[in-house]
Image (cartoon, rainbow, N blue to C red):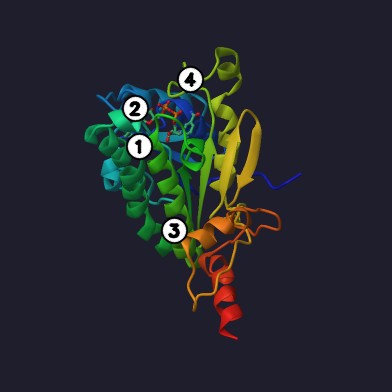
């Protein structure tokens, strides 16, 4: 049996925690002893309007269960206010779960600037603002955990979700660099790509499966990634329906050409199968490893 995962001296912000996955994360963090800032603007799934009752209801639920929480009704695009609220109420900030999100699905042909911008603003700028405001406090205390919410729509693509897919994979790009910059201050940064039955996926997932994809099945991973026990950083985890897997980049050995002589589009075509052959593929963990094959090719022809 592992050590109990506890948060007695820790303060956690969960954004978009008035419903869906965020609510489940907030409840589980509180159950494990965390003081929780339940943030939610309370708008529609398309990002319209605002309503304080979403966050207030979850705070009431946490308090009824004996936990400690406050509500915050700011938009994640005002991330500094959310972090200030946590500091004013609890004096510190240890964990940020960037979960708030909206959908504005449209094919790319029909996409307008407003749909593109709002999805970017809530998911990417919002996660940036909250995390950026919390970052100096985490550095100062030499401790922090940050979780970003990506999506399979970003990793693999999904018809009608060019704006959302861009934002979600962008958050994983942010995860990778923050993991490098945070490591020396014990700030660990990971991303999840969840699948859960929420208002966001209602009608998109068959009803019988929707019922089984309970948001509560995502939260144990999120709470673990937010804990002191977690030593993982830079990870991407697909999670849902009681299953958790880790996703990584895979790169073929590829084809090398003589960099001194140059090569033609026809040479590329002739090597196409080799370029895409994943037999013996590698899994570069950082940029230095990623450049290894290219450097080896330069050396091969330099001799
Ligand atoms: N449900 C899934 O299968 C699934 C799949 C992949 C990714 N996600 C991601 O998981 C996260 C949670 O989604 P969900 O399925 O629980 O949907 P949801 O709509 O139930 O929850 C999202 C919450 O974010 C809040 N929110 C929206 N804009 C906000 C803003 N500007 N500031 C503060 N709060 C805001 C909403 O009010 C809502 O309560 C989202 O980032 C979503 O993109 C969900």
Q: CA distance from mark 2 to mark 3?
A: 31 Å
Q: Position of residue 292 (x, y in %)?
A: 58, 71
Nearer-the-camera pick, 67 or 284: 284
Residue placed at 47% from the left, 64% from the top?
Answer: 264
Cα distance between the residues tagged 3 and 4: 33 Å
N-terminal of the two: label 1 or label 4? 1
Asked if the residue at tag 3 contacts the one at tag 2, i.e. Cβ–Cβ closer than 8 Å, the answer is no
Q: Mark 3 and 1 residues: CB-CB less than 8 Å, in contact?
A: no
Q: Nearer the viewer, residue 152 or 254?
A: 254
**Which numbered dot is residue 163?**
1
* Neighbourhood count class around disc 1 (C-alpha, 10 Å): few under 14, some 14–19, many 20 upward: many
Q: Which residue is mark 4?
A: 204
**Residue 178 bears which disc, if any?**
3
Q: Residue at (28%, 48%) from the top-left corner?
A: 80
Q: Residue at x 31, y 41 (%)?
A: 120
Q: Which residue is denoted by mark 2 in the rendering?
A: 106
Q: CA distance from mark 1 to mark 2?
A: 8 Å
- Please, is residue 12 above or below residue 23 in the view? below
């Amino acid at each position: 049996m592992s050590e109990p995962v506890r948060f007695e001296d820790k303060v956690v912000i969960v954004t978009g925690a008035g419903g869906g996955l965020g609510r489940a994360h907030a409840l589980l963090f509180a159950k494990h002893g965390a003081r929780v800032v339940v943030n939610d603007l309370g708008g529609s799934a398309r990002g319209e309007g605002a309503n304080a009752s979403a966050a207030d209801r979850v705070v009431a639920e946490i308090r009824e269960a004996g936990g400690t929480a406050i509500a915050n009704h700011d938009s994640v695009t005002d991330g500094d206010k959310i972090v200030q609220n946590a500091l004013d109420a609890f004096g510190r900030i240890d964990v940020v779960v960037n979960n708030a999100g909206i959908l504005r699905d449209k094919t790319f042909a029909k996409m307008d600037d407003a749909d593109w911008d709002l999805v970017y603003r809530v998911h990417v700028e919002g996660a940036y603002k909250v995390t950026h405001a919390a970052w100096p406090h985490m550095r100062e205390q030499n401790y922090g955990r940050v979780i970003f919410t990506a999506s399979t729509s970003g990793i693999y693509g999904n018809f009608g979700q060019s704006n959302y897919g861009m934002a979600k994979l962008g958050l994983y790009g942010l995860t990778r660099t923050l993991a490098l910059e945070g490591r020396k201050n014990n700030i660990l940064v990971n991303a999840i790509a969840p699948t859960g039955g929420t208002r966001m996926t209602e009608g998109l997932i068959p009803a019988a499966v929707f019922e089984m994809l309970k948001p509560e099945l995502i939260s144990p991973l999120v709470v673990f990634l937010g804990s002191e026990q977690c030593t993982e950083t830079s990870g991407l985890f697909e999670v849902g329906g009681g299953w958790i897997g880790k996703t990584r980049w895979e790169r073929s050995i590829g084809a090398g050409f003589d960099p001194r002589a140059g090569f033609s589009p026809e040479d590329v075509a002739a090597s196409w199968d080799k370029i895409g052959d994943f037999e013996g593929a590698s899994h570069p963990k950082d940029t230095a490893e990623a450049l290894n094959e290219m450097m080896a090719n330069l050396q091969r022809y330099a001799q």
